[in-house]
Image (spheres, rainbow, N blue to C red):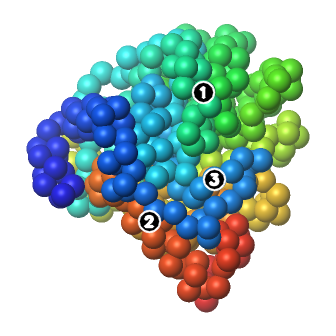
Amino acid sequence: MYERLRRFLFRLEPERAHNLGSMAARAGQRLAHGLLEKRFQFESDRLRSEVLGLSFANPLGIAAGFDKNARLIRFWAALGCGFAEIGSVTAKKSRGNPKPRMFRLEEERAIINRMGLNNQGAARIARRIAAGHPAAIPLGVSLTKTHDPAIQGQDAIDDFTTSFSACAPFASFVVLNLSCPNTAEGRTFEDPNALDELLKYIMPIRSTMENPPPVLVKLSPPVADGVVLDSEVDEIVAVSIAHGINGFVASNTESGRDLLDVSDERLASIGAGGLSGPPLRSRSTELVRYLYETTGGELPIVGVGGVATGQDAYDKIRAGASLVQLYTALVYEGPAVFRSIKMELDELLERDGFASVSDAVGVGPAT
Ligand SMILES: Cc1cc2nc3c(=O)[nH]c(=O)nc-3n(C[C@H](O)[C@H](O)[C@H](O)COP(=O)(O)O)c2cc1C
């Protein structure tokens, strides 16, 4: 059924299609929640796990960026997502970059975006998640700095702590999106010294909270295949651990274009932006594996990048991910993608003799 809808949506400009799809999802979560549940749910005890002190009915969630303003939380639950990550949310509301800012690369089933953190701002979004608190599924809130190059230094830290204070009380977990490549000032908080400064402010606020949520750090993908990352990642990990960070999300979109077999003209017509979808898959899995090995499997990792099948999710899990997310596959495959991935993942776990998804985390590639 999605095939026909997709043909229609793909005739539209990508952001319009996204907005239309989101509107339909909002209507669906209000009017047809039960129907959606019936159509899309798949449960298995093998997929249940405890991660970050939270219970997950399955390890598959919607990644940050699709539901920036937290309007679709009941929809994600009805689709059978094990969790949802909303945002990224910033202290001040933002319209983001000028349009067009989202592009499909249909042959690669990929997306390039430079949305630039359009969202309604922390105060408004916090009110919305507070009204629905606690959500039906674990709710991650992605936070990042307001898209405004004039906000730098201590102001940038204050900006981040403002959104943390507003949203964290209603979050099952918080993700600090350090790596958004789509802002004029670039990857500010991925600099280990800047991250150190930021966490000096964030973590003490967290420790004064009545129910402090776990805090995770989201990273960019490695810069080249096969290289496992340089000292910058090691430093980010060391700083994060020193401040008591609870886990990592790997990875954000890729700024480079070397993963693509697309004409230079086409790429030039698109311009800057983060690449997502299958071309990113192995690089982000590599980062998952690297983080798992570096941390000795002590800190949970959320694996994201190019997941479209149960096998893709399984590969991330075997590389070290306790939870898995997707965004781009939802655009190309439609809402049934969560169910089909869960079913296939369940079969793969059973085939390989795992009683629980947690037992497969970090076991390494299948031989
Ligand atoms: C249009 C779009 C907007 C995104 N916005 C955000 C965002 O606001 N915050 C964030 O942390 N990641 C954002 N992402 C990145 C995704 O969360 C994810 O890390 C990335 O797309 C790789 O996963 P995928 O290949 O399954 O799409 C965005 C991705 C896309 C395609």
Q: Position of residue 181 (x, y in %)?
A: 50, 36
Please, what secondary structure does the residue beneath circle 3 have? strand
Q: Amino acid at mark 1?
A: His
Q: Residue at x 79, y 30 (%)?
A: 212
| First of labels 3, 1 by sequence position | 3
Which residue is disc 1 drawn over?
A: 133
Q: Residue at x 37, y 41 (%)?
A: 33
In this rendering, is residue 135 above or below 162? below
Please identify the quarter of the rendering in which residue 50 is found: bottom right
Please identify the quarter of the rendering in which residue 357 is found: bottom right
Which residue is disc 2 drawn over?
A: 341
Query: Which residue is nearer to you in this view: 275 or 73?
Result: 73
Q: Position of residue 193 (x, y in %)?
A: 77, 31
Q: Which image quarter holds the N terminus?
A: bottom left
Ligand 1 is within 8 Å of the C-beta of the residue at disc 1:
no
Q: Which image quarter holds the C terminus?
A: bottom right
Q: Amino acid at mark 3?
A: Phe
- Are circles 3 and 1 on residues that touch, CB within 8 Å? no
Q: Residue at x 17, y 36 (%)?
A: 13
Which residue is disc 3 drawn over?
A: 56
| First of labels 1, 2 by sequence position | 1
- Confirm whether residue 90 shows in the render: no
- Are circles 1 and 2 on residues that touch, CB within 8 Å? no
Give the Cα distance between marks 1 and 2: 28 Å
Q: Residue at x 33, y 52 (%)?
A: 335
